[in-house]
Image (cartoon, helix red, strand yellow):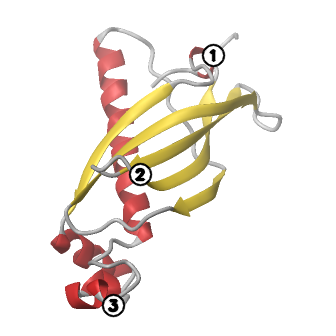
Amino acid sequence: MRFFEDIEIGHRREIGAYHFTADSIKTFAAKFDPQRFHLDEEEGKNSLFGGLAASGWHVGSACMSLLVADGQRLAREAAARGEEVAVWGPSPGFRNLRWIKPVLADDTISYVSVIIDKRSSASRPGWGILTARTTGTNQRGEDVYSITASAFVPMRKGA
């Protein structure tokens, strides 16, 4: 992963895609969001969603999983090039979580993150805070998910 100084506002990162199957929707819902339109095709079809719909929390969890996997991939690639790898800190939070359109069985959502703000941390010397807007788009080009989240990112030592 990159250091705070190396990341510019506007930097775009394609995180990856996740295919929502009926089975994955039902499995997630049974454990974390057991509402009828997430568990049963007929109930989903007769709901406002018009089909078996993934929980919004499932859509967000898929995004997080892809975000972490992509970060690990980037860190491995940087290490293989002999570069120093920045170990990012936790997130101080998020805002503006939106489930814009339903994600239905057999939808594939592609996630993209864009840096929209960066600042030095006032409370943690040596750290910056990046803010990114991450969106998910289905195979029809429709935005279905959006979140604005922040993360602590280390500055280079001596910078």
User: In the rendered image of this protein, does residue 24 appear above or below residue 149?
Assistant: below
Residue in the foreground of this view, choosing between 40 and 8:
40
How many marks can you see? Answer: 3
State the image coordinates of residue 53 (x, y, percent, origin top left). 32, 74
Which residue carries the number 1 mark?
Answer: 5
Specify whether 68 is left or right of 145. left
Q: Amino acid at mark 1?
A: Glu
Which residue, given by chain and number where applicable, does mark 2 sit on?
Answer: 64
Q: Residue at x 34, y 36 (%)?
A: 70
In the picture, residue 75 is in which quadrant? top left
Which residue, given by chain and number where applicable, does mark 3 sit on?
36
- Mark 3 / mark 1, whichever is N-terminal: 1
Find residue 159 and report its horizontal and vertical position in percent.
70, 11
Q: Is residue 63 above or below residue 68?
A: below
Could you tell me if residue 30 is visible in this image? Answer: no
Say few, some or many: other residues with alpha carbon within 10 Å of mark 2 (under 14 / 14 to 19 / 20 or more).
some
Say whether residue 23 is left or right of residue 10: left
Residue sitting at the far right: 122
